[in-house]
Amino acid sequence: MPEKPKSDANSAKLLKLVFGEVYPLYVKKAERKGRTKEEVDEIIAWLTGYGAEAMRRHIEMGSDFETFFAQAPRLNPDASKIKGVICGHRVEDIEDPRVREIRYLDKLIDELAKGKAMEKILRA
């Protein structure tokens, strides 16, 4: 049986990461750079359409990223404006839509940690 390409294996791992385990890391990254948990939550809400209560339920249920994004109320139509490199990959070139959505979130959190204004992060 042929070996899966490394990127496919990495994508599968990424989809199975538990959102509730990664979320505090997003918050910690933002806070280390003088940003807030509320800003992280605003970014997640903008991208996915989740309110605070729905997001909390996903954290409590132990939803993986695949489920978290599959059940999102709506992906923001402006998400396609998110461009750039994250973890060595151009987000706009990622073929798997779920992996691309996860990388969109990673990119937005990176922009927050780098001090970018919320208006620019949210593509306003």
Image (tube, rainbow, N blue to C red):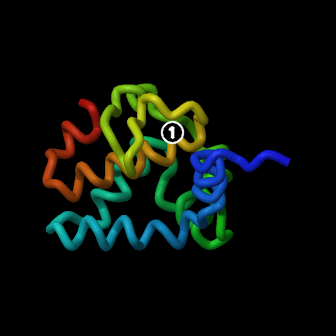
Determine whether the residue tagged by mark 1 lies in a helix, strand or loop.
helix
Residue position marked by numbered label 1 in the rendering: 100
- Name the foreground residue: 84 vs 109: 84
Residue 56's place in the image compared with 5, above or below, is below
- Name the foreground residue: 108 vs 46: 108
Residue 47's place in the image compared with 95, above or below, is below
Q: Position of residue 86 (x, y in %)?
A: 36, 47
Q: Residues within 10 Å of mark 1 (few under 14, many from 20)?
A: many
Q: Residue at x 65, y 53 (%)?
A: 9
Q: Residue at x 55, y 63 (%)?
A: 19
- Name the foreground residue: 82 vs 41: 82
For this view, does 99 lie left or right of residue 80? right
Q: Residue furthest front?
A: 2
Q: Residue at x 63, y 59 (%)?
A: 13
Q: Position of residue 58 (x, y in %)?
A: 61, 63
Residue 96's place in the image compared with 39, above or below, is above
Kind of residue indicated by mark 1 = Arg
Count of marks overlaid on the render: 1
Q: Quadrant of residue 118?
A: top left
Q: Position of residue 109 (x, y in %)?
A: 32, 54
- Name the foreground residue: 81 vs 73: 81
Q: Residue at x 32, y 47 (%)?
A: 108
Q: Quadrant of the C terminus?
A: top left
Q: Residue furthest right?
A: 1
Q: Position of residue 60 (x, y in %)?
A: 62, 73
